[in-house]
């Protein structure tokens, strides 16, 4: 099975509150992107790593990371205005049957999670990972609780997410044509009418969003 790994790494991470883009912030002496690629490269024999970035400013930095990890099967692709534009640019540079898309700042991805995603491809063309909501969930408006909802219906979506490439491209084309706004590739497939399967993620598979996320993640690297 030919699978390309796509890493959108062109974002600036405004909520991270740092002068450095969060994917290049160092944990234990290495950039977060290094840790992400290190774990991901050990999870499956990907045909190619396709990294969406700002070519002018980031290419040399990423090339050094890939060299230090002894990864030579990679491409750098110019990122777009938004994350989903970057992903679209990357999937159009792939020739694999499937593409696995993973956040550049989710460094604790595991082989077990990747294996669960790939196994599910026997039945679905779109598979995501995530965790069931454990806490009580309430809808709040103007700092006042409106109601409590059934948490069994809610799921925290993570990456990696994996898709049949040709279907994902068609999904993107549909979303662009309709002028829809999406927050991840699974939503692209949802809008396109494609079923999306779910497998269990790992509680450590945290995305670095805020600066204080660093303390938690550094304990596992």
Image (tube, grey):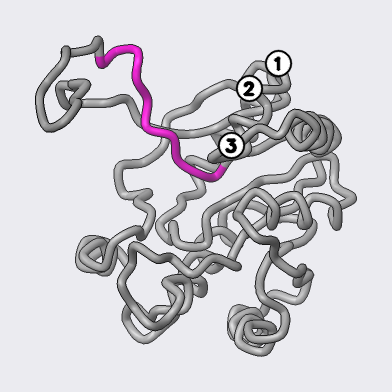
| Residue 171 visible, this orientation | yes
Outermost residue to the left: 144
Residue 159 x %, y %: 51, 44
Residue sitting nearer the eye, 207 or 68: 207
- Name the image quarter holding residue 144: top left
> What residue is shown with label 3?
182
> What residue is shown with label 2?
190
Magenta-tinted stretch = 151-160
**Residue in the picture at 60% in, 36% down:** 181
Which is closer to the viewer, label 3 or label 2? 3
**Residue in the picture at 81% in, 45% down:** 2
> What residue is shown with label 1?
193
- Secondary structure beneath dot 1 equals loop
Which is closer to the viewer, label 3 or label 1? 3
Residue sitting nearer the eye, 152 or 182: 182
Please tell me which of labels 3 and 1 falls first in the chain. Answer: 3
Please give left or right for residue 181 compared with residue 194 in the image.
left
Residue sitting nearer the eye, 215 or 108: 215
Rounded to the nearest whole Å, what is the CA distance between mark 3 and mark 2?
A: 10 Å
| Residue 74 visible, this orientation | no
- Secondary structure beneath dot 3 equals loop
Please give left or right for residue 193 compared with residue 147 in the image.
right
Q: Which quarter of the rendered picture does the N terminus lie within?
A: top right
**Residue in the picture at 57% in, 40% down:** 184
Other residues around mark 2 within 10 Å, as few (<14) / some (14–19) / many (≥20): some
Residue 180 x %, y %: 65, 32
- Secondary structure beneath dot 2 equals helix
């Amino acid at each position: 099975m030919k699978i390309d790994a796509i890493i959108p790494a062109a974002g600036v991470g405004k909520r991270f509150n740092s002068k450095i883009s969060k994917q290049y912030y160092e944990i234990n002496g290495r950039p977060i992107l290094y840790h992400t690629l290190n774990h991901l490269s050990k999870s499956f024999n990907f045909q190619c790593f396709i990294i969406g970035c700002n070519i002018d400013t980031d290419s040399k930095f990423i090339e050094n990371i890939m060299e230090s990890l002894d990864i030579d099967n990679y491409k750098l692709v110019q990122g777009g205005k938004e994350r989903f534009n970057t992903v679209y640019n990357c999937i159009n540079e792939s020739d694999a049957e499937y593409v696995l898309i993973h956040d550049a700042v989710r460094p604790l991805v595991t082989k077990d999670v990747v294996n669960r995603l790939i196994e599910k491809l026997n039945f679905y063309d779109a598979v995501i990972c995530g965790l069931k909501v454990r806490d009580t969930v309430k809808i709040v408006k103007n700092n006042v609780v409106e109601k409590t909802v059934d948490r069994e219906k809610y799921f925290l979506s993570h990456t990696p997410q994996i898709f049949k490439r040709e279907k994902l491209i068609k999904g993107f084309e549909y979303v662009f044509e309709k002028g829809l706004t999406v927050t991840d590739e699974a939503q692209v497939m949802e809008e396109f009418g494609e079923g999306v399967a779910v497998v269990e993620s790992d509680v450590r598979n945290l995305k670095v969003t805020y600066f204080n996320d660093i303390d938690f993640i550094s304990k596992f690297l």
